[in-house]
Amino acid sequence: MIPRPFEYYAPASILDALGLLQKYGEEAKLLAGGHSLLPMMKLRFAQPGHLIDLGKISELRGIREDGDTIRIGAMTSENDLIWSALLQKKCPLLVEGARHISDPQVRYRGTIGGDICHGDPANDHPAVMLALGASFVLRSSTGERVVPADGFFVGMYATAMHADEIMTEIRIPTPASGTGSCYSKLKRKIGDFATAAAAVTLAMKGEMVSQVTIALTNVGATPLKARAAEDSLRGKSLTDANIANAAHLAMSICDPSPDQRGSAEYKTAMAGEMTQRALRTAGSRALR
Amino acid sequence: MATKQAVSMKLNGKVVDVVVEPRELLIHTLRENLGHTGPHIGCETSHCGACTVDLDGMSVKSCTVLTVQCQNSELLTIEGFEKGGVLHALQECFSEQHGLQCGYCTPGMITRAYRLLKENPDPTEEEIRYWMAGNLCRCTGYQNIVKAVQFAAKKLATKAA
């Protein structure tokens, strides 16, 4: 199984990569970690004439805190996210999400930017990005724009990114200290995509929920932000009844496709279950 | 046919030069061009881990890496483990603890375990299972594979002390 022939480029800078992207336009594809694109190319689902590898661009890697924002280079690997002391301390949801992705070998190669830009609703970072209120820096040869994660995912394998743009950075507002979070994922086996998963961040004031975000993986054409479920919990306590009600509201926006992972009904029910589990765990991790 | 590219890499300590089409997968270059048939092709879809090699300090599935991506890289395959007729501790322990049955997954298992023990010299059983999860054994011999990695960790610690 090998891809169709293509020309390969390994630019050393973002500027060089943008130049190549402009030159080859729709014929070109950007290569990040390659663990979604190369399998698609081997199956001939993707047949780019020109492959632009971002792997040698060191300015696209790294994790740092800048004021109250965590800034992550788009080509930072899943493994680097997992071992980042900064993220473990200040943004454990991202670490927990990355630990659920595929397997160790894939996580050495797979990148956060690649996972997001692929637009696959089965990928784990998109829902985590929605829950964290992240935004994405997109650079083209004419300039740079910053796009919120909420609204970035527009359909199956479709995002708000233009063909002449490269995602350079992911920006995450540093979660307030004391915030609890959880990524709860149901999968059939290691390496599988989610049957359903839920990402939650939660801040408590005494026994009341002061802030909550809920986002779902792989139960629609895009990751889903469960707004009604979030609204239902603000100012309430985390009782079993309130959690069950939020889970029902989250289930009401699910529209999964039936496949070998289960029927639409089963996946929807599991999205509810993952929402409940993520809320309970995030609640136990939040400081009162 | 796309333009062929020259790629220079260090394979088990020796510089090798190849000229490949950009679409050539690393596992094919290793096996067919460089005669390194230790890394196996199991699924060719980055699921099974039989083709695992160590690339610049990372365990990777060489069926999902292009050879052209490896310019100036350092590669370690199972062929690079034995030194002067002496087996590596992992090879000894896989043998002593019966960590293989048919042997097909073994080169990938050992190569992955090598990097795991570099990063975590004293892993718990749970950690071994989590960090070895990218390698499948269809003889279902995981029990002894985990044991072999644990014994190798001990043996390597004794050697280092």
Image: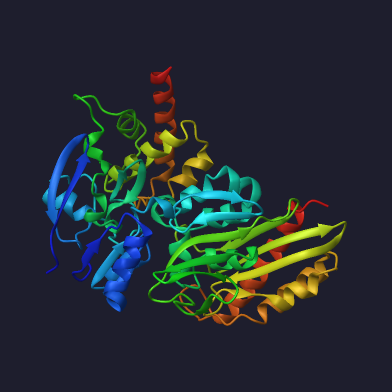
Does B3 appear above or below A259?
A: above
Say whether residue A192 is visible: no
Q: Looking at this view, is A149 or A100 the one in front?
A: A149
Q: Nearer the viewer, residue B96 or A127?
A: A127
Q: How is the image coloured?
A: rainbow
Residue A226 in percent (x, y) is at 67, 75
Quarter of the figure that contains the N terminus of chain A: bottom left
- Residue B3 falls left or right of residue B116: left
Q: Position of residue B43 (x, y in %)?
A: 29, 60
Q: Nearer the viewer, residue B119 or B97?
A: B119
Residue at image position (53%, 53%) is A99
Q: Establish if B32 lies above or below A227.
A: above
Furthest-right residue in view? A206
* Residue lying at 32% horizontally and 41% vertically, measured from the top left: B111
Q: Say left or right for B115 vs B34.
A: right
Left or right: A227 in relation to B4: right
Residue B106 image point, x, y percent: 30, 43
Q: Residue at x 76, y 51 (%)?
A: A178
Label tally: 0
Residue B11 visible in the current orientation: yes
Q: Nearer the viewer, residue A27 or A202?
A: A27
Q: Residue A240 in the image: x percent, y percent?
A: 81, 66
- Quarter-of-image position of residue A264: bottom right
